[in-house]
């Protein structure tokens, strides 16, 4: 079982390259709604082979920073992510390509309004 590290403890126990990779995966998820491909991670980190990325991801997983789903390719998630958010992203990705941006914008607007309301009425 993988443990989830508290946000404040996220940067402890990792190399600068692992930190770079972890930040890239998180940002990529936010921008694209999916994990980057190993080759994209390899290029971003300036490595010569995908095996180096695999070793870094395994290390991050062993330390509880990321979660992988072994039965799916391209399925690296930051540990502690909200499962509902992952399910919503998966549902959006099943939509026809032309509908995805519209649904993403609708959900983003809803999330922003919901967050603003929760800040006003704690």
Image: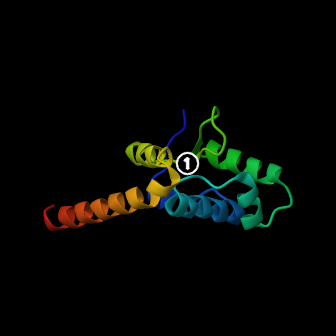
Residue positioned 77% across, 64% down in the render: 43
Count of residue discs: 1
Q: Residue furthest right?
A: 48
Quadrant placement of the C terminus? bottom left
Residue 46, given in percent of the width and then of the height, sits at 79, 67
At x 55%, y 64%, the residue is: 27
Residue 94 higher or lower than 122, as above or below = above
- Name the residue located 76 percent from the left edge and 60 percent from the top edge: 42
Residue 76 lies left or right of residue 7; in this view the side is right
Q: Is residue 106 left or right of residue 47?
A: left
In percent of width and height, residue 36 lies at: 64, 55
Q: Against 91, is 114 above or below?
A: below
Q: Quadrant of the N terminus?
A: top right
Viewer-proximal residue among 36 and 118: 36
Nearer to us in this view, 63 or 56? 56
Q: Is residue 19 left or right of residue 29?
A: right
- Give the class, few, some or many, for how many residues have Cα within 10 Å of label 1's Cα (few <14, many ≥20): many
Q: SS of the residue at dot 1?
A: strand
Mark 1 sits on what residue?
77
From the top left corner, tell me how far across and down residue 103 is, in percent.
39, 56
């Amino acid at each position: 079982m993988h443990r989830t590290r508290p946000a404040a403890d996220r940067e402890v126990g990792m190399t600068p390259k692992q930190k770079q990779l972890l930040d890239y995966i998180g940002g990529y998820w936010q921008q694209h709604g999916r994990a980057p491909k190993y080759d994209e991670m390899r290029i971003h980190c300036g490595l010569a082979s995908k095996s180096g990325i695999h070793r870094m991801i395994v290390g991050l997983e062993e330390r509880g920073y990321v979660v992988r789903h072994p039965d799916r390719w391209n399925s690296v998630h930051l540990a502690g992510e909200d499962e509902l958010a992952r399910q919503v992203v998966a549902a959006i990705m099943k939509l026809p390509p032309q509908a995805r941006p519209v649904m993403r914008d609708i959900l983003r607007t809803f999330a922003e309004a919901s967050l603003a309301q929760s800040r006003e009425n704690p």
